[in-house]
Amino acid sequence: MFERDLSRGDGTNFHTEFVIVDLKPPKEYHFMKNHRTDRFPRVSPDGKQLAFLSNRLKDWHIHVADLESGAEEAITAKHADLGVPSYMNWSPDGKQLVYIHGENDLGAQIWIMNADGSRPRRLSHPVEEGINRVLKYLPSWSPSGQFIMYSEVTLTPNFEKVGPTRLIIQSVRTRQTDIHNFPRDYAINNGCWINDRIVLLSIETGEIEPETNWEIYRYDLISRNLTNLTKHPAKDFHPDWISGTLAVFPLDKLTIRWAHLKQPD
């Protein structure tokens, strides 16, 4: 599943829709057509539900839809008074969602709720009152479900960055925060988990002139060792990870052989 922009890029006719592609046999079809503001599709771990952001109720809400029947519900409409939600991600067991909540002028916060919209609660710690604004980006759940990773920066009213770029690893149970400081000229676009110790990050380092570049890095949360994996002049975003043992077989599937993918050093 992916999001298709049908607005033609003219900036005046916003129109996106979700597209599902069956690989065998190849077939493409639209899911929930004619809702022009559906964004950020996220399929649940069991493949049965879809979480997404939409303005179809004239206010932005996180919706959850059944992929077989198409029945859907705006689950954050139950607590609309808490603020405007945005980018979301499923827990590994599919029972909860982590999402960004724009609470006030001080910036967004990281929240968790059950998959039916019940029991919303803030995970990130409240921001102190002041003139600066703290922005948080793209939360993701660790494979064990114990931690949530997101990045944050502090900006002045003139949108100048204050202090380092921070990668936050936060315990879901205790809310304890492990802060990883990166140089101020670094930007972290997004990332994913390899395991509860190793993550992949898309980082702009500001070291390449005249235009900065985005690369994929491997980052060890314990040793804090950062390793560039891509080293390519193109901009590299949205890393993802496949773990475990995979079947390797010829296209005709007459014989099945087993192999193991080595973990990177």
Image (cartoon, rainbow, N blue to C red):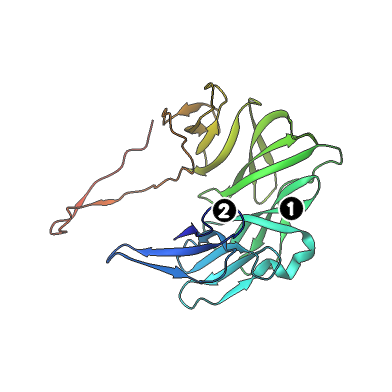
Q: Amino acid at mark 2?
A: Asp
Q: Residues within 10 Å of mark 2 (few under 14, many from 20)?
A: few
Q: Quadrant of residue 95?
A: bottom right
* Residue 141 % position (x, y): 56, 50
Q: Residue at x 14, y 56 (%)?
A: 255
Q: Is residue 95 visible?
A: no
Residue 6 or residue 28, whichever sits in front:
6
Disc 2 designates what residue?
10
Residue 13 or residue 238, whichever sits in front:
13
Q: Is residue 175 visible?
A: yes
* Residue 132 % position (x, y): 81, 37
Instruction: Give the vertical position of 116 relative to 166 (above or below).
Output: below
Mark 1 touching mark 2, by CB under 8 A?
Answer: no
Q: Secondary structure at mark 1?
A: strand
Q: In the rendered image, which quarter contains the C terminus?
A: top left
Is residue 29 left or right of 187 when viewed as pictured?
A: left
Q: Earlier in the sequence, mark 1 or mark 2?
A: 2
Q: Residues within 10 Å of mark 1 (few under 14, many from 20)?
A: some
Q: Residue at x 50, y 50 (%)?
A: 143
Q: Quadrant of residue 224?
A: top right
Numbered label attached to residue 102:
1
Q: In the rendered image, which quarter contains the N terminus?
A: bottom left
